[in-house]
Amino acid sequence: MKQIRWAVVVALTVAGVTHGFGPPQERNMLGEQLGKLLGTELSFTAVAQMTMADAKGKQLHVMEMDYAVREGNMRTEVDLARMSVGSDLPAEAAAQMKAMGMDKTVTIARPKERVMFIIYPTMKAYCVLPAPADAPSPENPPKIERETLGQETVEGHSCVKEKITITDPDGKKQEVLAWTATDLKGMPIKTEMRQGKETATMLFRNVKLETPPAELFVEPKEFKKYGSMQELMMSRMTGMIPGGRPPLPMDEE
C-alpha cells in the first residue's frame, strides 16, 4: 500500500537525517558528517532545524526535532506536526501515519554498538536498525581539517565560520561549512553542505550544554520489538483493517 511505503520512507529519512544510519538511498550525508564533527566529547540538548533548499535557495523540506547528545550517543524526537516535507508526502499518507500512531518518532543512535532504535511511543513499539558497513565508527575516526573563513553571529552566538574537510579512512572526502560557537565549547551550532544540486542546513537553537540523562539513550524494552520497519508497519495496518485482513505487499498499489 502507498501509505506503508510512505511511512517506511519517512521513518528511514528521519534516521538518515539525524544520524546518517539507514540504507544509502535514504541517508542524509549532513546528518552523517555532523555525527563525526560532534564526536564523543560534547554533551547537550537543543532544538534542531534541518532544511533542504534547491540551487536557487528555495526551501524544499524543513524538519524540526528535539535533539540530545551524550558521549557520542544521539537521540531525536520528531513530531509530524512540526515537520514540513514539501509536496512529497501526500495529505492522505500523513493522515494515515497519524491514525497508525506513527506521527511521533524517537530515534536513538548508539554508534559504538553500531545500532539504532526507531521508536513509536504512541504505538509502544520499536525496531532495531543495524548500522551499514560504511556508517560512522568511533573506533576508526575520520581526519578533520579546518580552514577559518571569518567571524559571524548565529542565533546570538559569536561564531567562527569554517570550511571543514572530513576524510574517511577509505579516502572519501566531504566538505562542510560550520559555524562553531565560541561560547558553546566550539559546538557547530550551524552546518551547511551541498548534496548534488541541493543544500542541507542544520541549525541548533535553545542549546544547553548539560549532560542528558542516560536513560534517554537505552533500548525501550517495555515496548514491543519488531525485526524491521516493514514488519512493524504491516502488523499495525493489519490491526486497523476490519477482520484483520493483511494489507497488500509493499510493491503493490
Image (spheres, rainbow, N blue to C red):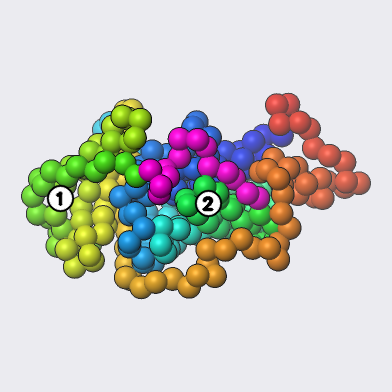
Mark 1, residue position: 161
**Residue beneath the point at 32% across and 30% down:** 172
Query: Is residue 133 within the magenta segment?
Result: yes
Q: Does residue 95 appear left or right of residue 204 in this picture?
A: right
State the image coordinates of residue 113 (x, y, percent, origin top left): 52, 51
**Which stretch appears magenta?**
127-140
Position above or below: 168 against 39:
above
Q: Quadrant of the N terminus?
A: top right
Q: Position of residue 240 (x, y in %)?
A: 80, 50
Query: Quick one: quadrant of the C terminus?
Result: top right
Amino acid type of the residue that numbered disc 1 sits on in the rendered structure: Lys
Task: Give the camera-side residue of 240 and 225.
Answer: 225
User: Seen in the image, is 3 located left or right of residue 60?
Assistant: right
Q: Residues within 10 Å of mark 1 (few under 14, many from 20)?
A: many
Could you tell me the amino acid type at mark 2?
Glu
State the SS at label 1.
Answer: strand
Q: Is residue 100 visible?
A: yes
Residue sitting nearer the eye, 193 or 112: 112
Q: Is residue 238 magenta?
A: no
Alpha carbons under labels 2 and 1: distance apart: 33 Å
- Left or right: residue 16 versus residue 149 is right
Task: Identify the secondary structure beneath mark 2.
Answer: helix
Percent position of residue 230, x then y: 69, 40
